[in-house]
Amino acid sequence: MSPIIMATLTVFTRLVSIRGTYAKLLGLPHPLLVKCDGFVYGRSVMAYMCTDQSYMYDLLVIGGGSGGLAAAKEAVGLNAKVAVLDYVTPSPIGTTWGLGGTCINVGCIPKKLMHQAALLGEAVHEATKFGWQLPDPKTVKIDWEALTTAVQNHIKSVNWVTRVELRTKKIEYINALGHFKDAHTIVGVTKKGEEKILTAKNILIAVGGRPKYPDIPGALEYGISSDDIFSLNRAPGKTLLIGAGYIGLECAGFLNGLGYDATIMVRSIVLRGFDQQMVNLIVKEMEHRGVHFIYQAKPKKIAKQEDGRLLVDWVDKDGQIHQDVYDTVLFAIGRRALIEDLKPENAGLKIVPETNKIDAINEQTNVPNIYAVGDVLHKRPELTPVAINAGKLLARRLFGNSTEQMDYTNVATTVFTPLEYGCVGLSEEEAIMLHGEEEIEIYHAYYKPTEFFIPQKQVDHCYVKVIALRNGDERVLGMHFVGPNAGEVIQGFAVAIKCGLTIPKLKSTVGIHPTVAEEFTRIFITKRSGLDPSPQSCCS
Ligand code: FAD
Ligand code: NAP
């Protein structure tokens, strides 16, 4: 750019900046300024200076899931020229789906709908105790085909709305599998094998992951994963779920709730990384509801019998081989990030060998114009809101004036089993490791949800735990809740923790009666005291 043009643009930018100062004083968003490459320019100037004319897009997003779509929508709102590439490779049994990524198609949403279906089944059985006149609840059965059709119809409507939204916002959607040609060039390969060459100033990797399969005979031929269960074209029947993480527990929970025999095969411990006292409560509750657990076991072989059922061999910790027959075997042994398809070496992108994921500082990879968000990131929680927040904040930093970084600490989560376990902050084990046993105080209580009384539901595992610093301001470090609607309960307390919740503040909070969330405001027994944490009376 010639010095004369540059000087003219600078004077223009200064003038625009004065207008912006007034806007700032009035608390309005800046009317004419945008940030680009760390500098502030007038919007019209940016169109010339910042959108490098040699690239087709300001931002090219690979992966139209939670993180990628959030970043794309935010960026386009900040005047960036954006395209999104999304492509779903069929699962080993051929399941595929539309735009929107894991959460919408084969994750959070269908899972929550099936969780709800299981809860409704439970409610049908309880309803007669409340006076509802129904046919004998034992005769009430789930129609698997009707359930999957309803779930898939909802998903298709979300796919459609997502496509319309991209079109309306003028985000270019390209249905192609992308890989790097170089740090600014992506090759998109369509279903028909056509290649599209796309160039961008910034590239965002938001490709997420897919279920892992173990390397044992029959796994790929006869096993399924969470990619298939929500659209399975036959009732699952007696199901073996291999893996005791979120997905194994949640799928076993809703299958059992829907009336199918469900067994979880645990390799080491259940829900690694979670507070193990809480996990034990969840396991006991699941067992009470009829879920079976096989501990310290690894699958060895799956074979198809003549009757079409699956014969599974597994080995226990002593090396003994066991066998049983199932209608369905579902692998929930973790997810692999979709890195290889990207050909990261072509862009000089570094991958962490142990996890095969991308290590990014503030979502920026080792290649300065390439960013990553969501499940593909090394040592970050694999959760939808994490991907969405990181994507949005990144777009604001790239194309707005923001400097706000993603905060990955104190992210709340819930396991829907279907009695829920929700938590935020540190587990008891982590708190002891970080602060020492003498420096923390643990409050706890069992409680009885009011709605459990009439149907005489099991209350033994409804429990709350608050972990706090023992001295100083008694800051709350972690909150754990097993009970109905734990996700809804913990979400509010997650905000409180972000605001620096302390034990005195929690105790002085007036509860909402009669709710389960109020149990957190009633805590007074510490583990150290040795007092009995059995349920208090309803209204004392
Ligand atoms: P994704 O949403 O996976 O999107 C990535 C997209 O990129 C996909 O569409 C993929 O096909 C596409 N893609 C991959 N490679 C390429 C390529 N080379 N070119 C073009 N496109 C490509 N999280 C929660 O917070 N709450 C829950 O209750 C919850 N439940 C879950 C239940 C299950 C069964 C599963 C599997 C996950 C669940 N999760 C839940 C996790 C959540 O779904 C993920 O954390 C989230 O979807 C990650 O978003 P992402 O943007 O990183 O990737
Ligand atoms: P995960 O939580 O990482 O659990 C994987 C489980 O499989 C572990 O129990 C692990 O045991 C076991 N395992 C690993 N390899 C195995 C093998 N070869 N044979 C037998 N068992 C094996 O993974 P996931 O359940 O697949 O879930 C993936 C991610 O999705 C989660 O991390 C979570 O963030 C997200 N998700 C979230 C929600 C939610 O928010 N409610 C729901 C579902 C999924 P070890 O402990 O021995 O390694």
Image: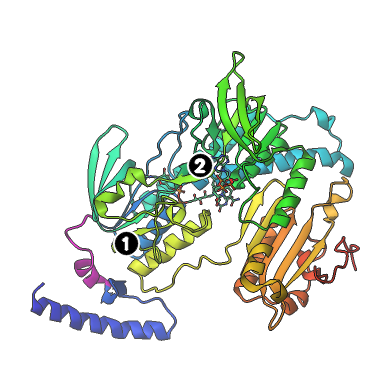
For residue 96, above or below residue 375: above
Q: Position of residue 267 (x, y in %)?
A: 62, 42
Q: Secondary structure at mark 1?
A: loop
Q: Is residue 444 left or right of residue 55?
A: right
- Magenta range is 43-56
Write the residue at 31% across / 75% down. 32
Q: Is residue 266 left or right of residue 185?
A: right
Query: Mark on residue 366?
Result: 1
Q: Quadrant of the C terminus?
A: bottom right
Crowd band around label 2 with a 10 angstrom C-alpha radius: few (<14), some (14–19), many (20+): many
Residue hosting label 2 = 105
Amino acid tagged 2:
Asn
Q: CA distance from mark 2 to mark 1?
A: 31 Å
Q: Is mark 2 within 8 Å of ligand 1?
A: yes
Query: Mark on residue 335?
Result: none
Crowd band around label 1 with a 10 angstrom C-alpha radius: few (<14), some (14–19), many (20+): some
